[in-house]
Image (cartoon, helix red, strand yellow):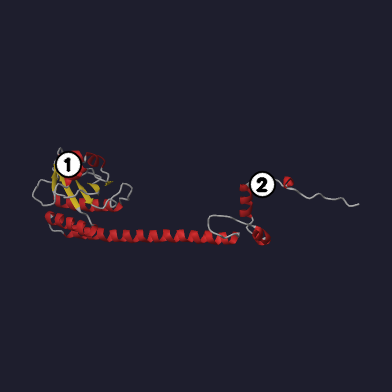
């Protein structure tokens, strides 16, 4: 007489951990190829759409991933183009600084380039009094070491770090006394990191132009170029 076998119930099935199932499926990717009935029977509800099969879900997931990668690629390409444009502008500044015959011409041309090429609305360029004895060059300010500008920007002179973002009204009015509208954002650029000789402040009406979290590479390059040109002409 044959022995009867009782059918298995859910209680007889060992409870599986979701992480263990996940790891096992990753280790055995051929499982669904050998067991297509599982895909046919699966009813997967998810937020990606109305697809109900795992293959359809994978396709939609891959499409979404490709869309994200494509968007990221376009963002990187835009950044690369922006950096190339900035590099060309910095090169034009360097060429001008090399060709300017006098300090006065250099200051005029620098201010012109910063306005036209970099869309800067307000520009302050100052040199500390011991380095600059003249006070007759239009657009170049002689900074008294104990004066109001030096005190207002004491942190910049002390740390020699570039500051970007909003500029408080008091300091903005101090360096841009003729501005009808104070800048919405600014870059405070010490000149330079080794032995500071002055200060360059760039102001713009665009609040997003200079932000606290932005990169400062091109501002650092500009600072080094301007500092070298000033030192060469100041003796």
Q: CA distance from mark 2 to mark 1?
A: 72 Å
Can residue 235 be seen in this snapshot? no
Q: Which residue is most to the right?
A: 1
* Residue at x 19% of width, y 53% of height: 229
Residue 161 x %, y %: 27, 44
Q: Which corner quadrant of the image does residue 171 belong to?
A: top left
Is residue 104 left or right of 4 when viewed as pictured? left
Can you say whether 19 is above or below 109 in the image?
above
Q: Which one is in front, 190 or 178?
A: 178
Of circles 2 and 1, the one toward us is: 2
* Residue at x 57% of width, y 60% of height: 51
Residue 173 x %, y %: 17, 44
Is residue 4 left or right of 52 when viewed as pictured? right
- Asked whether disc 2 touches disc 1, contact meaning CB atoms under 8 Å apart, the reply is no
Please give the label number shown on residue 16: 2
Q: Which one is in front, 206 or 41?
A: 41
- Disc 1 marks which residue? 149
Say whether disc 2 or disc 1 marks the residue closer to the N-terminus: 2
Residue 127 x %, y %: 16, 46
Report crowding for label 1: few under 14, some 14 to 19, many 20 or more residues within 10 A (C-alpha). Answer: some
Q: Which one is in front, 180 or 139?
A: 180
Q: Which residue is most to the left?
A: 136
Q: Which one is in front, 40 or 203?
A: 40
Report crowding for label 2: few under 14, some 14 to 19, many 20 or more residues within 10 A (C-alpha). Answer: few
Identify the secondary structure beneath mark 1: helix
Can residue 142 be seen in this snapshot? yes
Can you say whether 161 is above or below 106 in the image?
above
Can you say whether 181 is above or below 82 in the image?
above
* Residue at x 23% of width, y 59% of height: 117
């Amino acid at each position: 007489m044959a022995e009867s076998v009782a059918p298995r119930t859910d209680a007889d099935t060992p409870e599986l951990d979701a992480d263990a199932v996940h790891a096992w499926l990753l280790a055995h990717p051929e499982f669904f190829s050998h067991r297509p009935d599982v895909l046919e029977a699966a009813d997967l509800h998810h937020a990606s759409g109305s697809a109900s099969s795992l293959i359809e879900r994978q396709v939609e997931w891959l499409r979404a991933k490709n869309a994200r990668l494509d968007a990221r690629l376009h963002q990187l390409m835009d950044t690369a183009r922006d950096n190339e444009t900035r590099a060309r502008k910095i090169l034009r500044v360097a060429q001008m600084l090399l060709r300017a015959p006098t300090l006065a011409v250099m200051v005029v041309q620098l201010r012109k380039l910063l306005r036209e090429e970099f869309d800067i609305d307000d520009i302050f360029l100052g040199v500390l009094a011991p380095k600059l004895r003249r006070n007759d060059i239009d657009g170049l300010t002689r900074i008294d070491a104990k004066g109001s500008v030096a005190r207002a920007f004491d942190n910049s002179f002390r740390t020699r770090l570039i500051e970007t973002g909003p500029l408080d009204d008091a300091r903005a009015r101090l360096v841009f006394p003729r501005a009808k509208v104070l800048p919405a954002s600014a870059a405070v650029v010490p000149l330079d990191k080794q032995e500071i000789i002055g200060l360059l402040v760039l102001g713009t009406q665009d609040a997003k132009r200079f932000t606290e979290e932005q990169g400062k590479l091109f501002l650092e390059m500009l600072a080094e170029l301007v500092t070298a040109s000033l030192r060469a002409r100041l003796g």
